[in-house]
Image (cartoon, grey):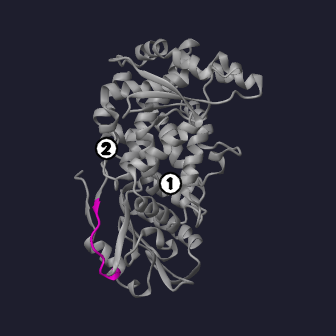
Amino acid sequence: MTMARSLTAVLVALALTPAGRARADEAASGDWAAALVARTDEIAAEISKLRGLKVKKKIKRDVMTVQALRARLVEAFAHEYTADEIAAEQLALERWGLVPFGMKIHDVLLDVLTEQIAGFYDPEADQLFIPSRPPPDDPAEAEADAAFADVLMAHEIVHALQDQHFDLEKFSDLPDAEGDAALARQALVEGDGVVAMYELMLARQQVEPPWNHPEAVAMITGGMLDPGDDSQLGRAPLVVRELLMFPYARGLQFVAALRARSPWSRVDRAFKSPPRSTEEVLHPERYLAGDDPPHKITAGKLPSLAGWREVEETVWGEAGWSVVLRQHGVDAERAATAAAGWGGDRMRVYVHGDGAIADHAAAHAVAVALTTWDSDLDAMELEESLVLAVDRLIAGTIVEESKGRTVWLGVDARVSIVERKADAVVVVLGAPLTAQATITDEVRKTWKVKRPKR
């Protein structure tokens, strides 16, 4: 979804170790990061053997202050996006009610990443870094962190090996408007690193990996998806929490499903034929079957929005629609069911007139999405949940309600619509009142859907 573009850009620019802080035995003296980095070659030899990826060249490494880490994150954002692109993403998230009006979501994301990153690999610099942080006051916590330090370093070394064998920058190079596919690929990258680091930890304890036991995998990912604390991550909006942790938690589940059936060489093959959507990450059996590619949707012009310009476009995918529903009061289980059966989607946000995007209020923007589903029943489940969600999102009243179509008139005299026909659902938020009778038909006429042959 929209926020996935920023998250994926940073994850690509800096392949990150998941939440936690890595320390070595020298934590009390403050030299833990330097001591850990000094062991890079030793850990690399161990993880290379386990993962089955040869170390083609010596891995560069260094220690970085937390202040330098934040500066690197700021640089990564600036490298990937212009001010207008950042403003467009902010506007889209506000229009869909995924962040409060006025909350600078990129500042929130910077705060979360600065707090959470235990290490990162920079594909452009071909170098891994460990941020040097002060040790925890609790001796037991410091000891636990020290024991976990090697496996966290192993995660970053896996990224270095991925880069040597699969070229991470090239692997992650997708158009900006393909947010769902980009998030799916990053789930493979991070899931590989998380599974490998767990296998290293378990191998040292002479314990078999639990990948054939779904309940064990769910236990591992549960804490990653629900921090349940007062950290920057715990306080962040749902869209940040879910999509930041998706590559790690859902990526772990995806790669674990491959490892439950096959050796590491099967994961290598996935880099040559990656998951095409978050649907395939969430349902590995669909990826393995390979018979359910996403529907390709191309957006066209909408006569009802003459004088309006498109400022943001992306694909949300199964992961994104689940977040939208949950954000607006649909319980997690129902949201997951409603988002399952996803076929394809395309979402655009429009503003009226010229000028800098930051000067346009999200409340005056129009959002339009076309979604397609595997069956009419799947589309109906999404429609029913979307009606509940949009009813929570829109300040207004329902003025039209018929089979497959619900229309709201907002207090701002704008209309919002959820309309289903067969296996397709159109969503419109905040359109001019003059567009009420025509805009959904225009979407169906001018937005082209290419469904794969079965």
Residue 196, relative to residue 289: is it above or below?
Answer: above
Instruction: Give the x, y percent position of residue 52.
Output: 37, 17
Viewer-side residue, 204 vs 244: 244
Figure check: 279 above or below 271:
below
Residue 386, percent across and down?
50, 66
Identify residue type, mark 1: Thr
Query: Is label 1 in a helix, a strand or a loop?
Result: helix
Task: Please give the label number shown on residue 337.
Answer: 1
Residues 342 and 232: in front is 232
Which residue: 47% across, 40% down? Answer: 247
Crowd class of label 2 (few under 14; some 14 to 19; many from 20; radius 10 Å): few
Q: Which x, y percent locates residue 125?
A: 38, 32
Alpha carbons under labels 2 and 1: distance apart: 31 Å
Q: Is residue 347 visible?
A: no
Q: Quadrant of residue 394?
A: bottom right
Q: Residue at x 39, y 72 (%)?
A: 350
- Magenta stretch contains residue 33: no
Query: Which label sits in the foreground, 2 or 1?
Result: 2
Residue 238 appears in view: yes
Residue 265, given in percent of the width and then of the height, sits at: 34, 23
| Residue 45 located left or right of residue 106 | left
| Residue at which label 2 appears | 173
Position of the N terminus, as image quadrant, is bottom left
Q: Which residues are magenta?
A: 297-305
Q: Secondary structure at mark 2?
A: loop
Disc 2 residue type (three-letter)? Asp
Considering only order in the chain, which callout, 1 or 2, is on the residue closer to the N terminus?
2
Q: Residue at x 41, y 34 (%)?
A: 189
Which residue occupies the foreground of this view, 258 or 67? 67
Residue 302 in magenta? yes
Instruction: Give the crowd class for mark 1: few <14, some 14-19, many >=20 residues within 10 Å.
Output: some
- Report the side of 332 relative to 453 (left or right): right
